[in-house]
Amino acid sequence: MNVLLFGATGMVGQGALRECLLDPGVRRVLTVGRRATGQRSEKLRELVVPAVTDLSAVEPELSGFDACLFCLGVSSAGMSEERYTTLTYDLTFAVAQTLVRRNPGMTFLYVSGMGTDSSEQGRTMWARVKGRTENALLHLPFKAAYMFRPAIILPLHGIRSSTRWTRILYTVTRPLYPIFRTLFPNYVTTTEQLGRALLTVAREGFPKPILEPPDIRGVGGVEAPG
């Protein structure tokens, strides 16, 4: 399987990239983003672009892929709905339109979030925008498209968020991880489980297009020791 990965320098994307590089069923991985990941592997190639919103210069290199793991996202904190829509809906849909033109047989997997509003009518801004994004992706003529809605994501294997305030939050709450797992077992996943779930669904599909936290945990399995 040839995998295209967006958002590889973010926390979720780092986890997805790690699992891609470890998975013997993944032949090659192409990451696309504004920064290099710093990872080295014979099956990894990286495209560093000035802006993901304009892929015209590299579009010919985006063909020949079986799956896209779209892990690119931003926090809505402090943003207007217009700005958040630009960075979430507009960007994601533009990339997806390019990819479906280049790879009609591709499976597209989008990392969204628990609480996303499929009706697009709710009171929470980010949930409406995410819902609109999911709905638009599900209507594109990919071979298949799946929306992943994780809740609490715990970083493993030295993975860290690229956002300063998120890093601080995870550092402060790390002692509470065992409590989270005990109190909310169905709603806590790890970067390893999420990455493995993305690859499993890309290969094997899933009975429904939207995966909630218990679905992700079920598909992602248990973490490897260490």
Image (tube, helix red, strand yellow):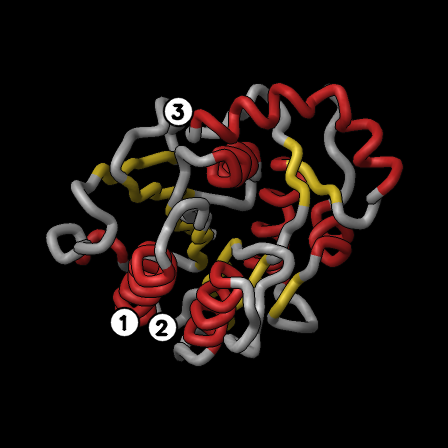
Q: Residue furthest right?
A: 182
Residue at label 3? 39
Side of 93 relative to 179 (left or right): left
Determine whether label 1 and label 2 are within 8 Å by CB. Answer: yes
Residue at label 1? 101
Classify 10 Å Cα crowding around label 2: few (below 14), some (14-19), many (20 and above). some
**Hey, what amino acid is under mark 2?**
Pro
**Hey, what amino acid is under mark 3?**
Gln
Residue at x 19% of width, y 41% of height: 49
The quarter of the rendered structure image containing the C terminus is top right
Question: Quarter of the image holding residue 189?
Answer: top right
Residue 45 in the image: state x and y as whole percent. 31, 36
Q: Of marks 3 and 2, which one's residue comes earlier in the chain?
A: 3
**CA gap, disc 1 to disc 2?**
6 Å
**Which element type, helix, strand or loop, lies under badge 1?**
helix
Q: Does the rendering let one see residue 224?
A: yes
Above or below residue 195? Residue 143 is: below
| Mark number displayed over residue 104 | 2
